[in-house]
Image: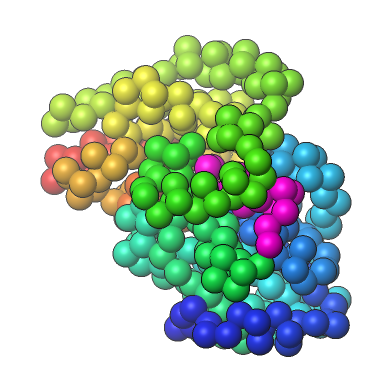
Amino acid sequence: MVEKYSDFEAFLAAMSGKSLLHIGHKDADCDALGSAYAMSRLLPGDIGFALELKAQAQSVATWLDLKWIKNPNPADYDFTIIYDTAGPGMLGVPMPAHYAIFDHHESGGHRFSVISNELSAMAEWGWVLPVESTCSLIIDLLQEHAIPIDQKMAVALAAGIVTDTARLQHAHAPALHRLAIALQAANMHVEDVWAVIEPKNIRAVRRPAVLHSLRNIQESTQQGWSILSTEIDSHDNAFVVMDALIQFGGDMVVVGFPKWGQSMVITAATAMLVEDTGIDLNGLMKVLAPTVNANEVWGTRVGGRIIAPIPVKELVVKCVQRAIEALED
């Protein structure tokens, strides 16, 4: 497996003059976008992603005035640099012949990760480190090599850290140190970065949808732990709703919505629940997958996602039932 490459400057020199594609996982979030954007400032090239950007990432892209390419073809470039992507299925486009990988998904890493990067073995250059976000990894490299971070780079990188730590709920001391570096470079506070991620006009549009979704909350309890679940109309509000349910006291939350003509459920657990019970939401999703003919499963111990061709309500109920069974074990 590729680990942290010893000569970042040699990598930068080797990429000079090449036609480059910077790409993150499909349906890209702020971490994929932020890391790709920051590196593209060092190594000019196109930035592209399969499908769409998540709503928060689109807000950041708008603030950056970033023009990105939808569904790019790596074959059109000399070299591809992949960010925040643990496996080929997450990329959403054909695998490039030649690529580098920057990723934070590694077993035993931050947020109780159980994922090992599947792309690192064939990468020609790579950095796969168990930190809280790929943006954190990029900040470390920039700091180590005394490479200046301008305001736009800093905001993009800070957005990746803030969102990948669930608005700092899962942040630890090194994460906060890296965020401080980005905030100082941006001359901003955390609230300023969050205003980029969730601008007022977006929050105003989302508020009625979030409030409506909260009317559907169901609570299940097991061994004194609270599992809060709900259904919403689209993916756009999913993580906002998830954050609200955790704020309401859910030890585990389950949010379902339609996605790509199927149903998707995302789950999250507090660090306390994982530490006290040993529950593994990624494992929970994998056990559930064959019973619902799932097309995609992904996650960590504290968060899992599943996509299946059954009604949203049914998938939510099955996820909650499986969680209750896991807590009984």
Q: Where is residue 246 shown, x and y percent of the image?
A: 38, 28
Q: Is residue 273 left or right of residue 13?
A: left
Q: Residue at x 63, y 37 (%)?
A: 188
x and y, in percent, of residue 267 in the image: 41, 40
The quadrant holding residue 125 is: bottom right
Q: Quadrant of the N terminus?
A: bottom left
Total numbered labels placed on residues in the image: 0
Q: Is residue 236 magenta?
A: no
Looking at the image, residue 64 lies above or below residue 22: above
x 73%, y 87%: residue: 14
Q: Is residue 245 visible?
A: yes
Residue at 79 percent across and 45 percent down: it is 64
Task: Answer with left or right where residue 175 lies relative to residue 272.
Answer: right
Tell me if residue 87 can be seen: no
**Foreground of the two, 203 or 14:** 14
Q: Position of residue 329 (x, y in %)?
A: 13, 46
When asked about the image quadrant of residue 286, the answer is bottom left
Residue 245 % position (x, y): 41, 25
Query: Which is the main secondary structure of the residues drawn in magenta?
Result: helix
Protein image colouring: rainbow
Nearer the observer, 146 or 106? 146
Q: Residue at x 58, y 85 (%)?
A: 7
Write the start and end of the magenta stretch as one range. Answer: 148-163
